[in-house]
Amino acid sequence: GEREAKTLVFTGRKIFALNAAGRIFMISQLTEALKYRGLPGNEASRIRQWEQYLSVSMENMRLIKEYRTPQSLRLFGRVFTLLLPPLYATSFAQLSIDTESIVFGCIIGAVTSLALTSLFEAVRQLEDPFARGFTFDGIDVTEELQVLA
Protein backbone atom coordinates (compact mmCIF):
# COMPACT_ATOMS: atom_id res chain seq x y z
CA GLY A 1 0.00 0.00 0.00
CA GLU A 2 2.26 2.77 1.24
CA ARG A 3 5.27 1.72 -0.82
CA GLU A 4 3.20 1.56 -3.99
CA ALA A 5 1.74 5.00 -3.26
CA LYS A 6 5.22 6.48 -2.80
CA THR A 7 6.39 4.87 -6.03
CA LEU A 8 3.35 6.18 -7.88
CA VAL A 9 3.80 9.73 -6.56
CA PHE A 10 7.54 9.67 -7.36
CA THR A 11 6.89 8.41 -10.89
CA GLY A 12 4.16 11.01 -11.44
CA ARG A 13 6.46 13.81 -10.33
CA LYS A 14 9.24 12.51 -12.55
CA ILE A 15 6.99 12.30 -15.61
CA PHE A 16 5.58 15.77 -14.93
CA ALA A 17 9.04 17.28 -14.51
CA LEU A 18 10.46 15.63 -17.61
CA ASN A 19 7.47 16.38 -19.79
CA ALA A 20 6.84 19.96 -18.64
CA ALA A 21 10.48 21.00 -18.35
CA GLY A 22 11.35 19.36 -21.67
CA ARG A 23 8.57 21.15 -23.51
CA ILE A 24 9.38 24.51 -21.96
CA PHE A 25 13.07 23.97 -22.77
CA MET A 26 12.09 23.20 -26.37
CA ILE A 27 10.07 26.44 -26.56
CA SER A 28 13.10 28.29 -25.20
CA GLN A 29 15.40 26.75 -27.80
CA LEU A 30 12.97 27.52 -30.62
CA THR A 31 12.74 31.13 -29.40
CA GLU A 32 16.53 31.40 -29.55
CA ALA A 33 16.50 29.97 -33.08
CA LEU A 34 13.87 32.53 -34.11
CA LYS A 35 15.97 35.33 -32.59
CA TYR A 36 18.95 34.11 -34.61
CA ARG A 37 16.81 34.28 -37.75
CA GLY A 38 15.67 37.86 -37.09
CA LEU A 39 12.88 37.82 -34.48
CA PRO A 40 12.80 41.23 -32.76
CA GLY A 41 13.97 41.28 -29.14
CA ASN A 42 10.64 42.55 -27.79
CA GLU A 43 8.80 39.61 -29.38
CA ALA A 44 11.30 37.15 -27.92
CA SER A 45 10.86 38.81 -24.55
CA ARG A 46 7.09 38.36 -24.83
CA ILE A 47 7.56 34.64 -25.62
CA ARG A 48 9.85 34.29 -22.58
CA GLN A 49 7.17 35.94 -20.46
CA TRP A 50 4.57 33.45 -21.73
CA GLU A 51 6.99 30.61 -20.94
CA GLN A 52 7.25 31.90 -17.40
CA TYR A 53 3.45 32.21 -17.03
CA LEU A 54 3.06 28.69 -18.39
CA SER A 55 5.59 27.15 -16.02
CA VAL A 56 4.15 28.98 -12.99
CA SER A 57 0.60 27.91 -13.88
CA MET A 58 1.63 24.29 -14.37
CA GLU A 59 3.44 24.27 -11.04
CA ASN A 60 0.39 25.78 -9.31
CA MET A 61 -1.84 23.06 -10.78
CA ARG A 62 0.57 20.40 -9.56
CA LEU A 63 0.58 21.90 -6.08
CA ILE A 64 -3.22 22.06 -5.98
CA LYS A 65 -3.40 18.40 -6.96
CA GLU A 66 -0.68 17.17 -4.59
CA TYR A 67 -1.15 19.19 -1.43
CA ARG A 68 -4.70 18.95 -0.20
CA THR A 69 -6.30 19.14 3.21
CA PRO A 70 -4.60 16.70 5.58
CA GLN A 71 -6.44 13.45 6.29
CA SER A 72 -6.74 14.25 10.01
CA LEU A 73 -8.57 17.51 9.27
CA ARG A 74 -10.93 15.74 6.86
CA LEU A 75 -11.58 13.07 9.50
CA PHE A 76 -12.38 15.78 12.05
CA GLY A 77 -14.86 17.29 9.59
CA ARG A 78 -16.58 13.93 9.07
CA VAL A 79 -16.80 13.22 12.81
CA PHE A 80 -17.98 16.77 13.46
CA THR A 81 -20.84 16.45 10.96
CA LEU A 82 -21.90 13.17 12.55
CA LEU A 83 -21.64 14.15 16.21
CA LEU A 84 -22.89 17.73 16.17
CA PRO A 85 -26.62 17.04 15.59
CA PRO A 86 -26.88 14.61 18.55
CA LEU A 87 -25.08 17.14 20.76
CA TYR A 88 -27.67 19.75 19.85
CA ALA A 89 -30.57 17.30 20.31
CA THR A 90 -31.51 18.94 23.62
CA SER A 91 -31.77 22.29 21.86
CA PHE A 92 -34.03 20.77 19.22
CA ALA A 93 -36.15 19.20 21.97
CA GLN A 94 -36.41 22.55 23.76
CA LEU A 95 -37.39 24.19 20.48
CA SER A 96 -40.16 21.66 19.94
CA ILE A 97 -41.40 22.25 23.52
CA ASP A 98 -41.36 26.04 23.06
CA THR A 99 -43.21 25.87 19.74
CA GLU A 100 -45.45 22.99 20.93
CA SER A 101 -44.66 21.11 17.73
CA ILE A 102 -42.49 18.00 17.80
CA VAL A 103 -42.52 17.97 13.99
CA PHE A 104 -40.87 21.41 13.89
CA GLY A 105 -38.09 20.28 16.25
CA CYS A 106 -37.47 17.15 14.14
CA ILE A 107 -37.43 19.17 10.92
CA ILE A 108 -34.89 21.64 12.35
CA GLY A 109 -32.71 18.72 13.51
CA ALA A 110 -32.89 17.05 10.10
CA VAL A 111 -32.16 20.31 8.24
CA THR A 112 -29.16 20.98 10.49
CA SER A 113 -27.77 17.51 9.83
CA LEU A 114 -28.43 17.84 6.09
CA ALA A 115 -26.79 21.28 5.97
CA LEU A 116 -23.64 20.06 7.74
CA THR A 117 -23.37 17.00 5.51
CA SER A 118 -23.93 19.10 2.37
CA LEU A 119 -21.30 21.61 3.45
CA PHE A 120 -18.76 18.87 4.11
CA GLU A 121 -19.50 17.22 0.75
CA ALA A 122 -19.15 20.56 -1.07
CA VAL A 123 -15.77 21.16 0.59
CA ARG A 124 -14.68 17.64 -0.38
CA GLN A 125 -15.62 18.21 -4.01
CA LEU A 126 -14.01 21.64 -4.20
CA GLU A 127 -10.81 20.35 -2.62
CA ASP A 128 -9.73 18.33 -5.66
CA PRO A 129 -10.61 20.08 -8.92
CA PHE A 130 -9.21 17.16 -10.95
CA ALA A 131 -11.51 14.50 -9.43
CA ARG A 132 -13.14 12.09 -11.84
CA GLY A 133 -16.90 11.80 -11.95
CA PHE A 134 -19.46 14.47 -11.22
CA THR A 135 -18.21 17.58 -9.47
CA PHE A 136 -19.64 21.07 -9.58
CA ASP A 137 -16.54 22.75 -10.98
CA GLY A 138 -14.25 19.83 -11.69
CA ILE A 139 -11.75 19.78 -14.49
CA ASP A 140 -11.77 16.69 -16.67
CA VAL A 141 -8.31 17.01 -18.16
CA THR A 142 -8.86 14.35 -20.84
CA GLU A 143 -12.04 16.03 -22.07
CA GLU A 144 -10.44 19.47 -22.02
CA LEU A 145 -7.51 18.24 -24.08
CA GLN A 146 -9.88 16.62 -26.59
CA VAL A 147 -11.78 19.90 -26.97
CA LEU A 148 -8.55 21.85 -27.48
CA ALA A 149 -7.18 19.40 -30.07
Image (tube, rainbow, N blue to C red):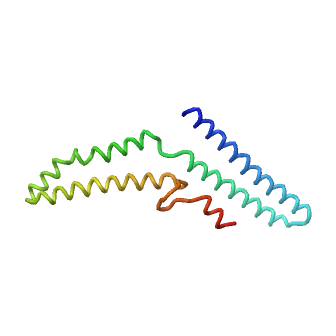
User: Which image quadrant is residue 106 in?
Assistant: bottom left
Locate residue 114: give its quadrant: bottom left
Placement of the N terminus among the 4 image quadrants = top right
| Residue 111 image offset from top left, x and y in percent | 26, 58
Outermost residue on the right side: it is: 37
Residue drawn at (32%, 47%), measured in percent from left and top? 81
Q: Nearer the viewer, residue 108 or 60?
A: 108
Percent across and percent down for residue 84 are 27, 46
Image coordinates of residue 54 in percent, x first then y, are: 69, 57
Residue 89 percent across, percent down from the top left: 18, 48
Q: At 73% from the left edge and 46% from the top edge, which residue is drawn? A: 18
Q: Is residue 12 left or right of residue 38?
A: left
Above-or-below relation of 137 to 93? below
Q: Nearer the viewer, residue 15 or 88?
A: 15
Tell me the quarter of the picture where residue 77 sits.
Answer: top left
Image quarter of the C terminus: bottom right
Q: Residue at x 22, y 45 (%)?
A: 86
Please name the residue shown 57% across and 59% down the image.
140
Q: Number of marks in the image?
A: 0
Residue sitting at the far top: 3
Does residue 19 appear left or right of residue 137 in this picture? right
Q: In this image, 77 relative to 42: left or right?
A: left
